[in-house]
Amino acid sequence: MPPERLGLGVDLGTSGLRLALVNPAGQLVAEHQSPYPAPFADPLGWREGLQALCLELPSDLRGAVVAIAVDGTSGTLLLCRPDGSLGPSPLDQALTYHLACPEQVEAAAALVGPAGTGVPAASASGSLARALRLLAQAPEPGPWLLRHQADWLLGWLLGDWRWGEEGNNLRLGWDQQRGRWWGRIAEQPWSSALPEICRSGQLLGPIGAAAACALGLPPECAVVAGSTDASAAVLAADLQPGDGVAVLGTTLVLKQFSDQPLEGPGISCQRVLGRWLVGGASNAGAGVLRRFFTDAQLVELSRQIDPRRSSGLALRPLPRPGERFPVDDPRLEPVLEPRPVSDALYLHGLLEGLAAIERAGWQRLEQLGAPAVQRVISLGGGARNPQWRALRQRLLQRPVLNRPQCTAALGMARLALSALPAP
């Protein structure tokens, strides 16, 4: 017999989708994952992937779902019509989180102030710059809606695309401390394209009939506003005072709780369950490793690394020019050479390069006023690599614990269930 009430969490990660079901005690009941059925920038692939994964769940478990919440990659933005439908090419694709739009920096600065002032939307890698590019590409005045990845799928679940979760919209220009859009954004002719902002964990209503039918979920299932993917993973980690989280996925994301909000280029600051969750996301991450090695090679070569020693290399493993955090520089170049003859030594250098970026990230957060992190909790696929953990612990000079089982989907499932009143 399944539990009476289950929460369903959906993670739209950079490398694929994951679903998690939890019971009222917060325990994992079931979990499924798969790659996207279409290129990552194709929104229809997000929806089709969710449908396929959800229907893999046994019908009795789907029938017990009382709430659902979705997280997505922060900054992946699209332009859609009020009914959620997509425009002609290139507007049928999203602009992904890592894409910088330096040609829009001047226009963004005219709306919110120049980059470097602490407004996340002022950056070339912010969603506001991507929004301005999308609007410039629109073939007609509209009406159009600007929606981030999780918010677009949230709209499909509800059959109502008006909402945008506040954490997902910080880089578009939402000022959550003051509860309004930064600068002159709300005064623009296209301001009707902006979402109505809701809080993470806010109960938005029952699932729409079309989505309930497509997913095989009960019509009374509640839809709960989710968060960004990195914040969702933090919710699953059950942090203690002094803990920081490093999400070792396709990109490297650092998060920690702070008593005060932080502002700065490339800095995210989200209110999650009444607390300030601060951090940043690098464009570097485990994704660049797959450019050179298969998963099997990564496991075997990692075993040949002595994490107590330095590789002697000084690499910056960015996948392409441009960085968001710990420095906000859309033109920062990768450093992937020299490549030694030994593949194990090269992997050693790449992992050290990622650890150096992580160290600089924690230092940057502390410089801005965050408490010094005493312990690092590692999440994501990279948290399964014990040599990387030991290497990072040496460079960070603090304990590092791996918890790969704490997934973003698990965090969303717990959030979904917590939004409902007790039976």
Image (cartoon, rainbow, N blue to C red):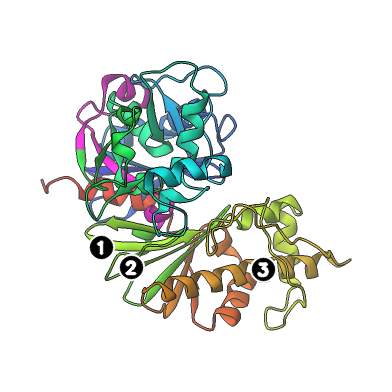
* Spatial CA span between label 3 and label 2: 25 Å
Q: Position of residue 133 (x, y in %)?
A: 51, 33
Q: Counting other residues with Cα less than 10 Å from the Cα at mark 2, is it few (<14), some (14-19), or many (20 or more)?
A: many
Circle 3 residue: 353
Nearer-N-terminus badge (1/2): 2
Label ID, residue 359: none
Q: Which residues are magenta?
A: 204-233
- Hey, what amino acid is under mark 2? Phe
Figure quadrant of the N terminus: top left
**Where, by quadrant of the figure, is residue 165 drawn?**
top left
Q: Residue at x 41, y 33 (%)?
A: 54
- Near-viewer residue (237 or 303): 237
Instruction: Give the farthest residue toward the right.
Output: 341
- Hey, what amino acid is under mark 3? Gly
Name the element at disc 2. Answer: strand
Q: Position of residue 132 (x, y in %)?
A: 47, 34
Q: Is residue 405 magenta?
A: no
Q: Residue at x 42, y 75 (%)?
A: 366
- Hey, what amino acid is under mark 1? Arg
Above or below, comparing residue 131 to residue 80 in the picture: below
Circle 1 residue: 275
**Where, by quadrant of the figure, is residue 236 drawn?**
bottom left
User: Can I make out residue 140 in this image?
Assistant: yes
Figure quadrant of the C terminus: top left
Nearer-N-terminus badge (1/3): 1
Label ID, residue 257: 2
Name the element at disc 1. Answer: strand
Q: Residue at x 52, y 47 (%)?
A: 124
Nearer-N-terminus badge (3/2): 2
Report if the CB atoms under discs 1 and 2 are less than 8 Å apart.
yes
Residue 371 shown left or right of residue 281 in the figure: left
Above or below, comparing residue 70 to residue 93 in the picture: below
